[in-house]
Image (cartoon, rainbow, N blue to C red):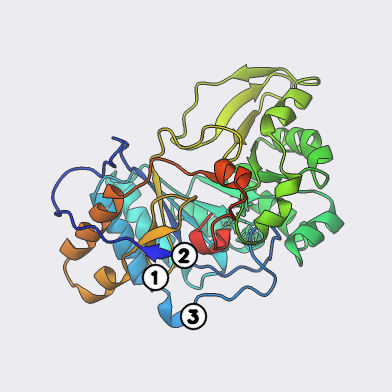
Amino acid sequence: MDKPVSMKIPAGPGPLVDPFARQITYLRLSVTDRCDLRCTYCMEENVRFVPRNQLLTLEELDRLAASFIALGVRKIRLTGGEPLVRKGVIWLVEQLSRHLESGALDELTLTSNGTQLSRFAGQLADAGVKRINISLDTRDPQKFSDITRRGDLSTVLAGIDAALAAGLKVKINMVAIRDFNDDEIADMMTWAHEKGMDLTLIEVMPFGDGERWLPNLFSLEDVRAKLGERFTFEELPVSTGGPARYVKVRETGGRLGLITPMSGNFCEGCNRIRVTCRGRLYQCLGHETFVDLRAAVQQHADDEALIDAIRSAIAAKPEGHDFEQRRRCGVPGARRDMSATGG
Ligand code: SAM
Ligand code: SF4
């Protein structure tokens, strides 16, 4: 069971700094746990969603985001579930874009499965979104339908084209799964780079049904070594403030990112926190403790209680996750779906 953490520390001025001297500047805000796909590594087929009356309203999400920005958050990523299935999400993006205009926020972005982008890409670009991550694990229509349990690949490919046509910079996220899509990685990379998109590979993490894929986990260092037989990599000193390490691929001119939560050091320098659509602040993807911000958002007209609760949560941010250690010890992964935490 998830456990709320309670630790009282005073509200006050100054940025959010955790006990390991990491400044929190990046908020991943889940606007819904619902999704029009059911990716097998992300959620169970008959997933039970959060009751609608427990969801924060769009106005509450806006207020929450503003409090984080006041505390020094410079980048917000809307996620989910699928953020673009939340009714009114474009209103929220438009509201949040005021912080881009004021200079308080450096970036407002989304992670999306791409199914709704043909409809929304133009509106996102108009609201100030410049970049978007789109998840795509395979370009084989049957495999796409299998891994998402229902998806139509052509809809997502059209969504990607719509995003590019709207002027959005696109990064493709591909969860790498042995014996499922490992034979497609090189093609996915050249395809993405030809279209001017970066590609990031992600190791599958033990969430919900994701545990079922752990035997198919493989180290992205092995993938990199295999790709290295065909491509030349130049190390890039790029720090996105995130867990991805990037290389430039000389033959294509594009960038390849590797996110290695299972096999590589992922937590050092972590500057991020996650807030779910019901207002739970998870300090770390790999831990089950959270601080519930909902009461502070809903019951107090002023922001003091909310800021107090946010600071308490940051004071309890763990140093890092322990997926690999737990796997070696046979301890199950986090007992929630990725979609519930906000990927
Ligand atoms: N629906 C959107 C999407 O698919 O991009 C946003 C939410 S999704 C939870 C965010 C990211 O988490 C996606 O790139 C997805 O592939 C990734 N993800 C989900 N479950 C995962 C798991 N068990 N291991 C690694 N990545 C996972
Ligand atoms: Fe939906 Fe994204 Fe999870 Fe797939 S990874 S089920 S698209 S939330």
Residue carrying label 3: 51
Q: Is residue 37 left or right of residue 334?
A: right
The spot of residue 251 in percent (x, y) is: 74, 20
Query: Is mark 3 in CB contact (under 8 Å) with mark 1?
Result: no
Can residue 233 be seen here? The reply is yes
Q: Does label 3 or label 2 sit earlier along the sequence?
A: 2
The image quarter containing residue 297 is bottom left
Amino acid beneath label 3: Pro
- Circle 2: element type: loop
Count neighbours of disc 1 (C-alpha within 10 A) and say few if under 14, some if 14 to 19, many if 20 or more: some
4 or 45: nearer the eye?
Answer: 4
Q: Give whichever of 254, 143 is nearer the camera.
A: 143
For label 1, the residue is 58
Q: In terms of image quadrants, where is residue 74?
A: top left
Q: Which residue is mark 2?
A: 31
**Residue labelled 2 has its Cβ within 8 Å of some atom of ligand 1:** no
The image shows residue 328, relative to residue 235, as above or below, that is: below
Label at residue 171: none
Q: Earlier in the sequence, mark 1 or mark 2?
A: 2
Q: Element type at marker 1?
A: helix
Quarter of the rendering containing residue 234: top right
Disc 1 vs disc 2: which is toward the camera? 2
